[in-house]
Amino acid sequence: MTGSPAGSGTPINFSYYRVVLSTSDALMLVLELLTWVGLIPGLILLAIGYARRAFASRFQQTWGIIIPSPAGTSHLWFRWIDLTRDAQSAPVPVDADESLRVGDEVEVWFDPRNSENARLDHPSADGRVLRTIGWVLSGVGAGAGVVQLIVLLVE
């Protein structure tokens, strides 16, 4: 589209797009995107990961034994004694070690507030993947922010 300013006879070309982006402008846009895409989700994942680890830290360790299913099925169960000296039992998780047999002694982690809530895996792994991804994303975002400041100061 062409036009002329008020009173002048020379045509002017109008464009809705910037014709040329300098290298530093393009770099700043990419760094800005990396900063926001890295920092915001990274910090959210870190908060969730540390909250899961804090929740899992209240589990206490005890020993239990593998027992046959009370319903007579082929699925194994495990039994343990909680803090109030009550016997508790629960089914062995599907992803547990396949070599477990009736009578095997296993390490049991249970929640003292809710004794029926027990597990055979160590609770310290809860939230580990979220924390790792959160640290990586936060590092990328913070690094991109620092590089963005350096590019801004160098210009």
Image (cartoon, helix red, strand yellow):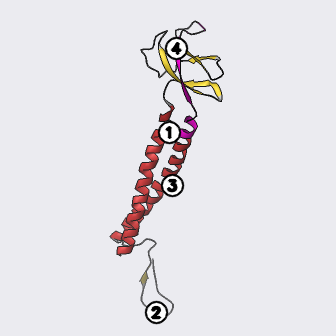
Element carrying mark 2? loop
Badge count: 4
* Front-lying residue, 77 or 144: 77
Query: Would you name the residue on which mark 4 appears?
Result: 65
State yes or no: discs 4 and 2 in contact (Cβ < 8 Å): no
Q: Residues within 10 Å of mark 1 (few under 14, many from 20)?
A: many
Q: Which mark is residue 117?
A: none
**CB atoms at circles 1 and 3 under 8 Å apart?**
no
**Quarter in which the N terminus is drawn:** bottom left
Q: Is residue 66 magenta?
A: yes
Q: Above or below — where is 4 with respect to 52?
A: below
- The three-letter amino acid code for the residue at tag 3 is Ile
Which label sits in the foreground, 4 or 2?
A: 4
Q: CA distance from mark 4 to mark 1?
A: 27 Å
Identify the element where label 1 is drawn: loop
Distance, label 1 to label 2, CA atoms, is 68 Å
| Segment tinted magenta in the rendering | 52-71
Dot 1 or dot 2: first in sequence order is 2
From the viewer's perspective, is the residue at label 1 or at label 3 nearer?
Answer: 1
Give the numbered dot on residue 8: 2
Q: Which residue is disc 3 drawn over? A: 40
Which picture quadrant has residue 15?
bottom left
Q: Earlier in the sequence, mark 3 or mark 4?
A: 3
Q: CA distance from mark 3 to mark 2?
A: 51 Å
Q: Kindly identify the amino acid type of the residue bearing the numbered disc 1.
A: Gly
Q: Earlier in the sequence, mark 4 or mark 2?
A: 2
Residue kind at label 4, given as amino acid type: Ile
Q: Secondary structure at mark 4?
A: strand
- Residue 141 place in picture, x, y as percent: 43, 57
Q: Residue furthest top?
A: 72
User: Which is closer to the viewer, label 3 or label 2?
Assistant: 3
Identify the residue position indicated by label 1 in the image.
Answer: 127
